[in-house]
Image: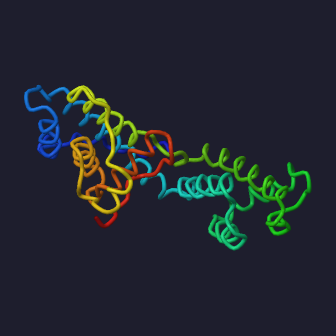
Amino acid sequence: MSDIVIPYKILEINLFNNVETALKNINSTANVGIHLIRIKAAVERAIFDEERDAAFEQLGPWSEELRKLNNFLKRLKDKPPTHDRIKKRIEALHQVTKYFLNARLKISGTSGKGLNELNLGSIEDLEELKMAVSHTRKIHHEKPGGGNHNSIYDVVRCVQWSYSKLSGKKPTLTSQDSAVRFPKDMNAYEELLLETIKIITPHATANSARELERATRGSRKKKPRSQSS
């Protein structure tokens, strides 16, 4: 595992032409050079982390499994999914993951039930499943490729900082309703954010950039995904 070397890419500055334009649109009289440099460094780090994750995923299922477990645990902590959905999520896990889950349930669960013996209609059994998923997630986090990097959120925070410094205002998003009905109707902050994110994820859209921004502020953490706008 330690023999893998991921080259750190130094991006050409012309890739940031649209970012520079968006910065100048916020404050046409300011020197945006320092902001461009900060954003460029954050983007380069995020791209490095993306490529590192992709390289480690070729060596084993741990990164993908960790994402599945993170998502599964979120669903269990909220309103529990239907029995069929829970079963499908379990079936989608790697066999090794299911082994850890089953062992955790058998060893630490008060009922001693395994995965196939759980009563998904029982609050107690669902709680034990939740604990087993949480424990297995910790195990996978220590595996090669485990863990989700946070540098994509650092990019958003860097954009937030630049916008605040240049505009003297707090960065805000257009309303949820407006974003759905008029996804291309962006304010100056959203334009800067989207142009920055598109360097990492070329097919990112206004709404996917907004989703990432909300995640950075503490709701769900998701990577930007392509959507039709």
The residue sitting at the right extreme is 111
Q: Going 35% across and 42% down the picture, which residue do you hit?
A: 46
- The answer to whether 94 is drawn above or below residue 219 in the figure is below
The type of colouring in the image is: rainbow
Residue at image location 79% in from the left, 59% down from the top:
102
Q: Is residue 52 above or below residue 229?
A: above
Q: Position of residue 76 (x, y in %)?
A: 68, 56
Work out whether 117 lies above or below 129: below
Left or right relative to 229: residue 97:
right
Q: Is residue 153 left or right of residue 125?
A: left
In which quarter of the view is residue 184 placed? bottom left
Q: Position of residue 133 (x, y in %)?
A: 71, 53
Q: Quadrant of residue 85?
A: bottom right
Q: Residue furthest bottom?
A: 84
Residue at image location 22% in from the left, 47% down from the top: 191
Q: Is residue 115 above or below residue 160?
A: below
Residue pictured at 26% horizontal, 57% vertical:
202
Q: Where's residue 110, x and y in %?
A: 91, 51
Residue 77 in percent (x, y) is at 68, 51
Q: Nearer the viewer, residue 71 or 95?
A: 71
Q: Quadrant of the C terminus?
A: bottom left
In this figure, what is the number of numbered marks? 0
Q: Nearer the viewer, residue 223 or 76?
A: 76
